[in-house]
Amino acid sequence: MSFDEEESFEHTLLVVREVTVYKIPPRSTSGGYKCGEWLQSDKIWSGRLRVVSCKDRCEIRLEDPNSAELFAACFIYPGQRESSVEPALDSSRYFVLKIEDGNGKHAFIGLGFNERNEAFDFNVALSDHDKYVSRENEKEASEKNATDSLIDIHPAVNHRLKEGETIRINIQPKPSSGTGMLSAAALSGAVLKPNTLCLAPPPAGSGKIRSPLPPPPNDPAAARMTSTSQGVGQRAPTENTRQTDPLTNFSQFE
């Protein structure tokens, strides 16, 4: 769940039934705090501890075990764990917390656990919250990059006419290009004539009758045809002479 989805989301990471709070002296050195310098008389409170994850912020709440009344709270913001919770230099069961009153004022108090394993669980709960914040930040970054990389090719557009709007359409005749089945001349009333079939003229020598090739000299049929044609040629002058000779008609008078 991302941080912006649920503002009131809280998750309890750890509950320790009894812890001790001390009033600590100012830091003696820049190296850190030492719980050996705390006195037993500096004990100011004991009660229940809860570690709560609130979105990207972690809260260490010191509450009354019976009434759940809040005694103090330590707010750990992202990247500020070392300045809000500091372990003691001489013991793993003691820590120094930076508490706030909600009005911008803060103070430092000592926190002690009765058992070493409780102090270990306290560190683990803080580490789990840091890992949770890192995962959520990476998830949001990846989702943002994926959203930025998407291109809306077909955005949603409302094409409906608003009240009072009209549409005017001007239709103009499309000029014919003459490339279809009917050209511009046909559309204007011209009569389409069918194409006439044109044949090429015969060659110049096609009117003459060609004589057949002479037969071979040894062909018997050719010899008979030659003799017959010669006989007819010899008899023809006799017949023609008989018909054309004017003296033949007067032979009886002799």
Image: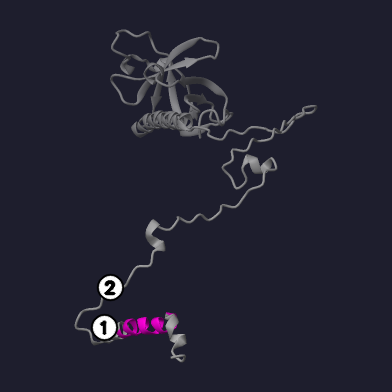
- Indicate how the structure is coloured in the image: one colour
Q: In the rendered structure, are the residues bearing label 1 and label 2 in contact, judged by CB atoms less than 8 Å apart?
A: no
Residue 8 is left or right of residue 190, and the answer is: left
Instruction: Please give the name of the residue rendered at 53% of the width and 56% of the height, measured from the top-left corner.
Output: 197
Q: Residues within 10 Å of mark 1 (few under 14, many from 20)?
A: some
Tell me: residue 154, above or below residue 192.
above
* Percent of width and height locating residue 120: 35, 32
Q: Which residue is mark 1?
A: 222
Q: Using residue 111 as the reference point, say whether residue 168 is left or right of it.
A: right
As rendered, which of 198 and 34 lies closer to the eye?
198
Q: Kindly indicate the quadrant of the structure image that contains residue 31.
A: top left
Q: Residue furthest front?
A: 254
- Residue nearest the viewer, comparing 138 with 62: 138
> Is 195 left or right of 241, judged from the image as shown?
right
Residue type at mark 2 is Leu
Query: Which dot marks residue 213?
Result: 2
| Residue range highlighted in magenta | 231-244
Q: Residue furthest left?
A: 218
Q: For residue 29, what is the image quadrant?
A: top left
